[in-house]
Amino acid sequence: MNAHRPVVLITGASGGIGADLARIFAREGHDLALVARSGDRLEALAAEIAATGRARPFVLPLDLAQPQACEALALALDEAGLTPTMLINNAGFGLAGRAAMLERAGQIEMIDLNIRALTELTLRFMPAVIAGRGRIMNVASVAGFLPGPGMAVYYASKAYVVSFSQALSQELEGSDVTVTALCPGVTATDFHARAGLDASLLKNMPSMSSMVVAQAGYDGLMKGRRLVVPGLFNRLTTRLLPFMPNGLLLPVMARMQERRKGK
Ligand SMILES: NC(=O)c1ccc[n+]([C@@H]2O[C@H](COP(=O)([O-])OP(=O)(O)OC[C@H]3O[C@@H](n4cnc5c(N)ncnc54)[C@H](OP(=O)(O)O)[C@@H]3O)[C@@H](O)[C@H]2O)c1
């Protein structure tokens, strides 16, 4: 018998979309386990949630790009008597610049976080999610539907997340467990600063707030949607641009990415 307390595990919850997902899940009465590298920001969010009268989230500062991090997370949850019956793989980052110009280590770290950690956490916790008839949400991106010259590894990592999530949702059909890929477009968070994108250009682009994106993700997850693309512009992008011949699409994407990159 499993006496562990069920929690929603959210990675990358110290800011942006992940922090707003945590606020929404807490408001809806879920107990939470929150992970990111910044312990102080996680503690502040836990205190904010506790101050609303909800259970104080379990927080664990952890660099999920490190090889042993998922193992350490599983052990820490077990020791705390917690079982993730919902898993929200949100932690991720991008780097802007041509692959040949960017440092190799940072690009590999992107794969470690955006792909390897997301996959490892999904595989590790899938039995608990299935047993708890829970749900999984992987935060992908509109970038997952297109090749992204100028952010090649990031776009490719998100294509993996879309593909992996959709395939898993089919494999789990009939099990009561749903898998959702949340695919935001440009969203106003710290993502752009970390990626080395020119944040001032955000003003001239159709961008969404992290709370609006998180709410769309939560609603879609609870409805068991396979794919959630918040915003009409983003939905059109994911449906129409993949039909453009690569000979036209690739130079357009390269020019767009070049303009978005900070000096
Ligand atoms: N913002 C956008 O325009 C946009 C668009 C499409 C998709 N997305 C995706 O949305 C997700 C959330 O990003 P965001 O926009 O909310 O950006 P953000 O504000 O930078 O949040 C990223 C989160 O991931 C955490 N994180 C980063 N590296 C980590 C690591 N090595 N280990 C553990 N946690 C780590 C960060 O916390 P720490 O720094 O404290 O570790 C933070 O909590 C990402 O997967 C991103 O790719 C964003």
Image (cartoon, helix red, strand yellow):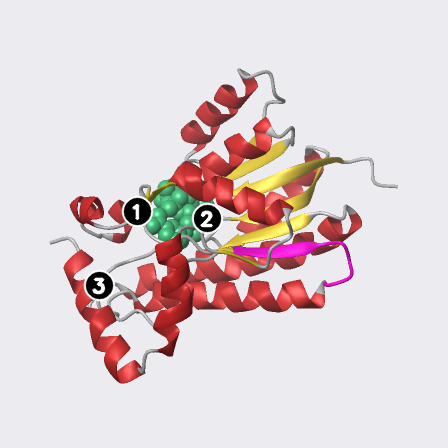
From the Cβ of disc 2, is ligand 1 less than 8 Å away?
Answer: yes
Q: Is mark 1 on a helix, strand or loop?
A: loop
Residue ID at (61%, 69%)? 167
- The residue where tag 3 is placed is 257
Q: What residue type is labelled 3?
A: Gln
Q: Which residue is drawn at 22% across and 63% down?
A: 257
Side of 168 where 211 appears, left or right: left
Q: Give the range drawn in magenta.
A: 173-181
Q: Where is residue 21 in the image (x, y as percent from the top left)?
A: 51, 38
Residue for badge 2: 91
Q: Earlier in the sequence, mark 3 or mark 1?
A: 1
Residue 174 counted in the magenta span? yes
Are there few (<14), some (14-19), or many (20+) residues within 10 Å of tag 3? some
- The answer to whether the beta carbon of the residue marked 1 is less than 8 Å from any atom of ligand 1 is yes
Question: How far across and how far down the image is residue 246, in percent?
Answer: 30, 82
Label 2's element? loop
Which of the two labelled residues, at mark 2 and mark 3, occupies the earlier sequence position?
Answer: 2
Q: Which residue lies furthest to the left in this view?
A: 263
Which is more N-terminal, label 2 or label 1? 2
Q: Residue at x 67, y 37 (%)?
A: 7
Residue 57 image offset from top left, x and y in percent: 58, 28
- Give percent across and percent down for residue 197: 22, 52
Q: What is the quadrant of residue 15 in the picture?
A: top left
Question: Which label number is shown at residue 207?
Answer: 1
Q: Label 1 neighbourhood size at 10 Å, few (<14), some (14-19), many (20+)?
A: some
What amino acid is found at the position of numbered circle 2 in the picture?
A: Ala
Proximity of marks 1 and 2: CB atoms separated by less than 8 Å = no
Report how far apart the C-alphas of labels 2 and 3 lie in the structure.
22 Å
Position of 85 relative to 48 (above/below): below
> Is residue 61 visible in this depiction of the protein?
no
Question: Mark on residue 60?
Answer: none
